[in-house]
Image: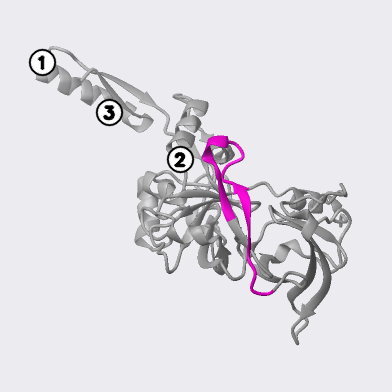
Amino acid sequence: MTHSICTLEFEDHRPLYDWFLEALELPHRPQQIEFARLNLSYLVMSKRKLLQLVQEKVVDGWDDPRMPTLSGMRRRGYTPEAIRALCERTGVSKRPGIADVTMLEYEVREHLNATSPRRMAVLRPLKVVIENFPEGEVEWFDAPNNPEDAAAGSRKVPFCREVYIEQDDFREVAPKKWYRFAPGQEVRLRYAGLVTCRDVVKDDAGNVIELRCTWDPESRGGNSPDGRKVKGTSHWVSARHGVAASVRLYDRLFTVEDPQGVEGRDFKEFLNPKSLEIVEGAFVEPDLAAAAPGARFQFERVGYFCADLDSTPERPVFNRTIELKDSWAKLEAKLEPKA
């Protein structure tokens, strides 16, 4: 052994370490080098505090996807390449500090964007009935597995009279610069073609439960031959072929950057009550039912997800690794009137 590498708290123990080495009369004495531990914002890295979270069942074990453990990060879908890239970016130092977790999130997005196959999934479904599409018929459209990698090939996605879209992709009263579904508005269903919302169906409580639309058959594949411009694009899943799935939406474990750094406060006071949201009744492309635990995907326009250890063909379960940047959310925030 040539070197002993350890974190800063062992620096005070170095005289004892050196005493043992001298007493053992080793032919080659290892050199002890101390360095600052890698800390990330919105997390705690102390094993004692992490053990406390596990024992008090704040999290679901050491491999809970919210935990900063290798098993937890693996289960969430973080890649080794992203973690190594973070370590290279932060470097080694003797100065204690906290690295911004957004650096890790950036590296995860970059690597998953380049390597993850694309699939469509609807987390909170709203039914769309395409009235001029023949009942009982199915069309299959080509969709690339990864636009970043031509060698990844393509897949076939089924399209029929009834599909699901995200509830958030519809507004009955469309705000300024809203290009998704709204009464009378034409939208592109990704890979399938252009549809126009003609009618809105509500339940007795006034909740929107269904959209009635028409499809332009000349726009098969996504664009119209007459060249008209349609800015809005929505992802979708065939109601007949989609597979019901459970989706776990993970967020940061704490609400403040340094949960241990507030004097006189217990770090658990800053636990994020919204660090986990379980969404039942999502629909995913049919081939995702066979996704092996640990397989990573980009759910188009939603985020990056990983098949969980609990996933089965009868009940697929997916963990959100990291969300995509939502351009509309940013725009909507700008458009909101200031108080």
Could you say which quadrant of the image residue 136 lies in? bottom right
Judge whether 130 appears above or below 158 on screen: below
Magenta stretch bounds: 135-156
Dots 3, 2 in contact, CB < 8 A: no
The three-letter amino acid code for the residue at tag 2 is Thr
Which residue carries the number 3 mark?
13
Per the model, the C-alpha gap separating discs 3 and 2 is 35 Å
Tell me the element at label 1.
loop
Q: Which of the marked residues, 2 or 1, is nearer the chain's N terminus? A: 1
User: Within 10 Å of the Cα at label 2, are there few (<14), some (14-19), or many (20+) other Cα atoms?
Assistant: some
Per the model, the C-alpha gap separating discs 2 and 1 is 44 Å
The three-letter amino acid code for the residue at tag 1 is Glu
Judge whether 30 appears above or below 45 on screen: above
The three-letter amino acid code for the residue at tag 3 is His
Q: Nearer the viewer, residue 98 or 91?
A: 91
Front label number (3 vs 2): 2
Which residue carries the number 2 mark?
79
**Mark seen at residue 25:** 1
Q: In percent of the image, x 31 and y 30: which residue is there?
A: 10
Front label number (1 vs 3): 1
Judge whether 203 appears above or below 289 on screen: below
Image location (x, y in percent) of residue 121: 59, 59
Give the colouring mode of the picture: one colour
Image location (x, y in percent) of residue 29: 19, 15
Quadrant for the C terminus in the image: bottom right
